[in-house]
Amino acid sequence: MRVLKTVRLRLRSLFRSSHVEDELAEELRNHLERQIERHRAAGLSSGDARAAARREFGNVALIQEQCRDTRGVVWLEDFMRDVMYALRMMRRAPGHTAVTALSLAVALGANTATFSLVNTLLLRRLPVTNPQELVELGSETPNGPGNFPYPLYERVRDQNTTFSHVVAVSSPVIRGDDDSSDQPPLGRYVSGNFFDALSIRAALGRLIGPDDDRLDSPDGTTVAVISNGLWQRMFGQESSVLGKTLAVGGTPARTAVRFTIVGVLPPEFQGLTVGRSDDFYVPLSSEPRISPRSLLNSPGAGWLKVVARLKAGVSRQTAKAELDVIYSGFINDGAPLSSEATRRQLRARRMAVEPARAGLSGPRREFGRPVLLLMGAVALVLIVACANVVNLLLARGLARRGEIGVRLAIGASRGRLIRQLLAESAVLGLLGGSVGLAFAVWGTPHLATLMANEDPGVVYDVAPDRTVLLFTLVVSLGAALATGLIPAVRVSRSNVPSLREDASARDARGGLSAWTRGLVAFQVALSLLLLAGAVLLVTTLRNLRTGDFGFDREGVLSMRLETPRAGYAGERRLAYFRAALERTRSTPGVRSAALSLGMPVISAGVDMSFEVEGRPREPDAIVFVNDVTDGYFEVTGTRLLRGRDFGPHDGPRSTPVAIISDTVAHRYFGARDPVGQRVGVGNRGMLEVVGVAATTKYQSLRESDSPIVYVNALQRADASGLNLIVKAAGNPTSTGVVVRRAIQDMAPVRVTPPLTLSSQIDRTLIEERLIARVLGVFALLAVVLAAAGLYGVLAYNTARRTGEIGIRLALGATRGAVLWPVLAESAKLAALGIAMGVPAALALTRLLSNLLYGVAPTDPRVLGAVVLCLFCVALIAALVPAWRASRVNPLVALRCE
Amino acid sequence: MSKPTDLVQGTLDLLILKVIALEPMHGWAVAQRISQMSNDVLQVGQGSLYPALHKLEQQGWIEAEWRDSENNRRAKYYTLTREGRRALNQEAAQWERLAAAISLIVHHG
């Protein structure tokens, strides 16, 4: 109650202060009158009584002041007054305020947007109870914890003592069939304890429990739980969804398995991977019903992500130690492995236990570092913007020296003045921050789309949450106070005599202050840093996109043909593929076509042992193997250096043949001709070399040359799916559509939509593209802000020196003579900034070195171009002030003096 | 922000509370009553009285209300709140202890 009353009183004094003041005045007047009456009653004349009462009463204003102090809202009142005053001052200089707030807004918007990514990827916790207990388990790999085979998951779940729960979710997704939508629902297998361990409650119905996931009861396992999103999208949020069925995993649809929907997940749970929202979950035990070759009993196939809850007080190190023991037990006795070599290889692996409070580590590993790098870059943009604000405030403070001098003279305290100037910066900061937030809300989804890499299944939820809002508030106020402090302190130091200093005396001191010059040069230096980084990344991207990697990507497109299980065994499958190839070649618009198991850079990477017949096998002789048909080299534009291509005559019954890459030929045959030799390649057996192809990049664009062996895809019927690659004569997109329809007309085979090779390779460059693009935008922002800063300072300086320029013109100086100094000043400031920026760039671009390709972080051409660009910018920024200086009318200028 | 110098710090609050406890009254009457009750020994200056009254009001110990007084003049009347009464008892007890202690020392020996 009392608190309420106090608050009410304080609010009253704050917002109805004039009312409160009136009451006080009336109360005191009342008192005075009674005192006068009393004196008159004691016999004084009316005049004497009044005088006596006043004498006794003392200083009314002082009493009022003291009463005001006891109300305890002085600082708040002062603050409100400061804010009002700040708003009034801003209204008086709207242009200045707009420019300052806009620079801040742009920089703060960029910071908020980037921070939204950091928040989504790295900070946001999973919406489960005690997310900090969650850890991700897996073998140690450079790309984060590797996948688990099912038998190892079972063993860890049953033998560990350090986790309270161990759950598994499949890494590959399974497709549901939804006829009404072209975006089929994607789901995953989960262990029966999954939802219970994460303590997630159903929004409707029930979730999958341990009873649904029993390997011994094959009939009870066809239940599914759907996400809230799918419930809305596919079932119109009807509660009658329970009991309906969802068809999963059938191509074509008639082989699909029907799952009964038993529950709907709450909207906040979207899966364990940031950016991926799973549409449905089915029990792991149903996997054999969907997959033709079940992985449940395979000890070598890693396909599960395993997440565990640490018991209270157990450290990750302890858990890891125990996990290593369980793992080596598994390798030694649990797993019937194909060979002793595999066992050795597996035994060398170590387990990793990583925090999973923000979800599985995939996107975090992929984008964590780039996003932090961008966060660093965008902080520099903010500093550039802040330097602008400091300079503008300094200039304005100088203009207000007279006013401040008066206030100091009549007794305002310095602290009070600083507080008032800071209130102005705070208002500016909040203004910039709120506009910046609007920029960020508009811009962040673009960044998220860029990060999703054209994959419709990936959606990053980057909507600003409390953390983001708090970040923006703190950074806005922090930036405002940091930028306000220097000018405020400097201005409040102006001493009282400066009141008397007239304009010409100030001009006589001439030039810009060291602070201003330093700040502008600093801005140029930071822009140089960002620009250099951006140019390096853009150059890298161009090198990766246009470099010679041994194959063409223009006009080449691919689609994957997936033959069904039934009716396509052995030679029938080969016959189908041969027919599909011939059909494609006869389609108009197709220049050449081939089939290929792997695609260079995109989905390459089966490595196998290699030996040359008649020679002992070298233990580390490994080659990459790709199964291709005739025409592959024509389509990809890879040159055949020797021998011949595969041909239709290389059938399943003729000698198995291979084409080796130049790298393999050099390494294993030296100067001898490999054509006609026989080589052994992994499980592909002994093959006769019939040709040598030019070396190409195979695993990634950045690798040094890979040793590749091409095997004839139409001599063995192993693969149920192959990529059809086509070189189009005209527009690849329309050709792709025609070819796909032709293939689909032939037989009920699944054909993925055609994609151009260049777009697919571009997808593998997501990290480079993200950084190049965003860094490019940031660098541009920094340069524009620095140019605005330079312009502002030069324009201000020219305006200040109008009188001096007028005198010089009156004394006979030419227009050029007053124009040049402005340009020279700008060039000098730019040079100063460049002198600071180049060493910083040389030191810091090293951070980018493992992202770069075909360009050194210290490439003098890049730095040269950046320096040249900044000089041009400095020149452009100086043009208007210089021109204005040359247009000064001596008569007008002198009259102003 | 001068403090009342003619009274021991803090005692003015006690005196005001005590006087208002008798009946609601306005500022002038408070000053009069204090000097009256102390046989003109204690004179409360306006410079101390009003800030003190406002402070007590902010603390929630007294409440103010505009009322018509004897000769049809409006005046601001102060009333003790329940909390004010509690505070008065505490302050009074505190004062008794302090006064007793001081007199012990003064009369010692």
Image (cartoon, rainbow, N blue to C red):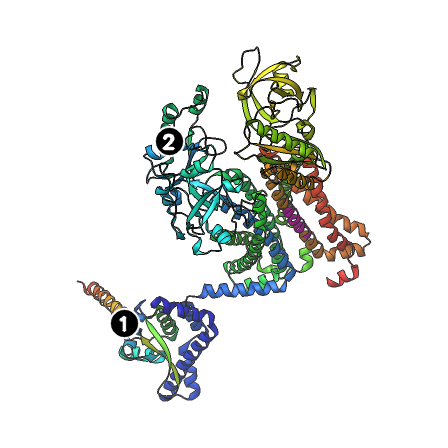
Membership of A789 in magenta stretch: yes
Q: How many marks?
A: 2
Viewer-nearest residue: A276 or A316 = A276
Residue A835 visible somewhere in the drawing: no
In the drawing, does residue A556 fall left or right of residue A437? right
Viewer-nearest residue: B20 or A164 = A164
The disc labelled 1 sits on which kind of residue? Arg
Tell me the quadrant of the picture where the C terminus of chain B can be found.
Answer: bottom left
Q: Which residue is mark 2?
A: A323
Mark 2 burial class by Cα count in 10 Å: few <14, some 14-19, many 20+: many
Q: Which residues are magenta?
A: A779-791
User: Relative to A895, is A60 above or below?
Assistant: below
The disc labelled 2 sits on which kind of residue? Leu
Overall secondary structure of the magenta section: helix
Q: Classify residue A320 by image quadrant.
A: top left
In the drawing, does residue A558 fall left or right of residue A888? left
User: Relative to B32, is A409 above or below?
Assistant: above
In the drawing, does residue A157 fall left or right of residue A535? left
Residue A378 in percent (x, y) is at 57, 45
Residue B22 in percent (x, y) is at 27, 78
Q: Which residue is mark 1?
A: B85
What chain does mark 1 sit on?
B
